[in-house]
Amino acid sequence: MVRRDSQGKNAGSRLFSLLVLAVDIVLLGALAGVVIYTLPRFTKIFEEFDAALPTFSQWLIGVPTNWYLGALAGVGLLLALKEIVIRNARVASALNCLAGLLLLGCVGAVIVGLFLPLISLVENLS
């Protein structure tokens, strides 16, 4: 017998949706931490070395921190509104998974953008 919650939704799919939402929130927090804490420190390091940065890294560092934080706050707001507006558990789960994949891609892009200059710096030193 399938357990249903008070609104008649499958309790298992609702739990999955909430777990994926929790992962999305953790990814939002990780990105915010990188933007607030790590990005400025990497910028100072590369300025001290006076090294040429790859184009992607220049773009990543050149975007104002407020833009990153605004975009992350917007994603968080959309995720919260989705939980209020969308009643279909499958659609909510699919949107949570999609948001998680997009956030994971953003985390990967930021990591690559921060470590590309280190690779080019090592190549220049050898």
Image (cartoon, rainbow, N blue to C red):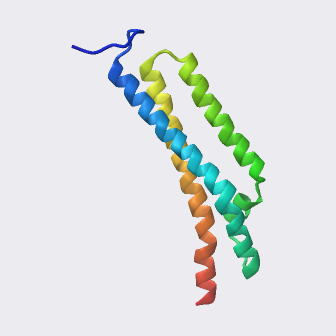
**Residue 52, x across and y down, in percent:** 73, 76
- Confirm whether residue 87 shows in the render: yes
Q: Quadrant of residue 4?
A: top left
Residue, far left? 1
Q: Quadrant of residue 59?
A: bottom right
Looking at the image, residue 98 sits to the left or right of residue 114; the answer is left
Q: Residue at x 54, y 55 (%)?
A: 108
Report the number of discs: 0
**Residue 64, x across and y down, in percent:** 78, 53
Q: Residue at x 75, y 52 (%)?
A: 65
Instruction: Examine the rendered structure and indicate whether residue 32 appears above or below residue 39.
Output: above
Instruction: Examine the rendered structure and indicate whether residue 47 appears above or below residue 77.
Output: below
Instruction: Examine the rendered structure and indicate whether residue 41 appears above or below residue 63.
Output: below
Q: Quadrant of residue 16?
A: top left
In this rendered view, identify the residue nearer to me: 25 or 126: 25
Q: Quadrant of the C terminus?
A: bottom right
Q: Quadrant of the N terminus?
A: top left
Q: Residue at x 48, y 24 (%)?
A: 92
In this rendered view, identify the residue nearer to me: 124 or 85: 85
**Residue 100, x across and y down, in percent:** 50, 40
**Residue 5, x across and y down, in percent:** 37, 13
Q: Residue at x 56, y 50 (%)?
A: 30
- Confirm whether residue 55 shows in the render: no
